[in-house]
Image (tube, rainbow, N blue to C red):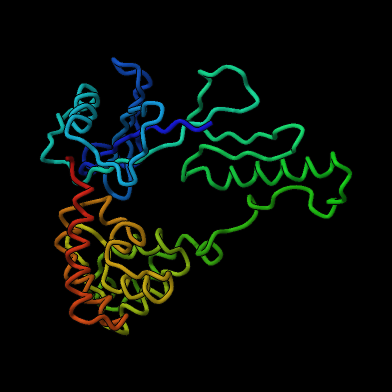
Amino acid sequence: MVSPSLGAHVVLPKYYVPEKFGMIIPKTKDGRVVFLLPWLDRAIAGTTDIALEPGQKTPTAPLGSRDEVDYILETIAPYLALRPHRQEVLSVWSGARPLAKDPTKTNSSDVSRDHVIAKETPSDVIVVAGGKWTTYRLMAEETVDLVLKTMRENGENVNAVASCRTSNMGVIGAHGHKDSLSASVAQSGGDGFGGSNPDPDVSRHLATSYGDRAMAVASLASFAGLEKRLHPNVPVIEAEVIYAARAEFCRSASDFLARRSRMAFLDVQASEMAINRVVELLAKELNWGWRRRRAETKKTREFLKSFRAC
């Protein structure tokens, strides 16, 4: 029902795309789709599409190749005023996307890059397949609504719940969010990125990344003297490491660099240069000994190699 396909993305400096501008090439010379979009003060371009052969094992940690990077850069180049070069690529990553086939359809070639939610008969088993990070709430909504519909058809009393409620529920950080949040964060950050030494990129990053929780990060930064950036090229600050360990169950440097923040996706070289400081902060917060610190540093350096073209 699911057919894996590998795809790579590259991150470029933000001057390759205006802040509120995006470009999509709907059909390249080999029939693929390529896009270029602004993303977290960078430009992201992708994607390749390499289908796995039947029976071929899906790699647990796929790597973007030099050929894929060259393909993306060569495809977007004719549409840009400047020709992008490989040395400008800040980060590369690859993933396996689940291309889904609706089990209720007979055409074997009908494979979708969107999610598929279907009810099998006569078992009434709900099948959820495919999808992507950006549509997880829509997938949940459609699944819950189909479950409720199925229950009603079977005579069960679910009248108290009309439909899925996710569209009216704010995610963590949304409830106290307001247009002036970035300014409030700057005030709470003290002189590190506010006050007499403003760094609007940091306060804006905290406000957009954490929502109303940004105030807690800013206060921690000011109180503990952790207002510094982990690297000058990325607006991620030291306090975020401690906050991730205390509030988000972060337990490794690679987890912070790739998931709690997006540093590895934005700039792999900056992330490599920040490893020692991230390990130092986590070690103090989580009481690591020297063996764990050394092992964590080595493991994180190896992990970050996956953000470079192989």
Residue 119 position in % (x across, y down): 70, 35
Q: Residue at 70% x, 49% y: name it.
A: 164
Total numbered circles: 0
On-image quarter of the N terminus? top right
- Is 37 placed above or below 104 here? below
Q: Quadrant of residue 171?
A: bottom right
On-image quarter of the C terminus? top left
Residue 4 position in % (x across, y down): 42, 33
Q: Is residue 146 left or right of residue 70?
A: right
Please name whichever residue, 253 or 76, is drawn nearer the observer in this view of the structure.
253
Q: Is residue 220 left or right of residue 132?
A: left
Residue 253 position in % (x across, y down): 27, 66
Please name whichever residue, 285 or 88, is drawn nearer the observer in this view of the structure.
285
Residue 295 position in % (x across, y down): 20, 69
Q: Is residue 130 left or right of residue 18?
A: right
Q: Residue at 74% x, 32% y: name it.
A: 121
Which residue sits furthest front? 55
Q: Is residue 100 left or right of residue 232?
A: right
Q: Quadrant of residue 234?
A: bottom left
Please name whichever residue, 228 or 245, is drawn nearer the observer in this view of the structure.
245
Q: Quadrant of residue 55?
A: top left
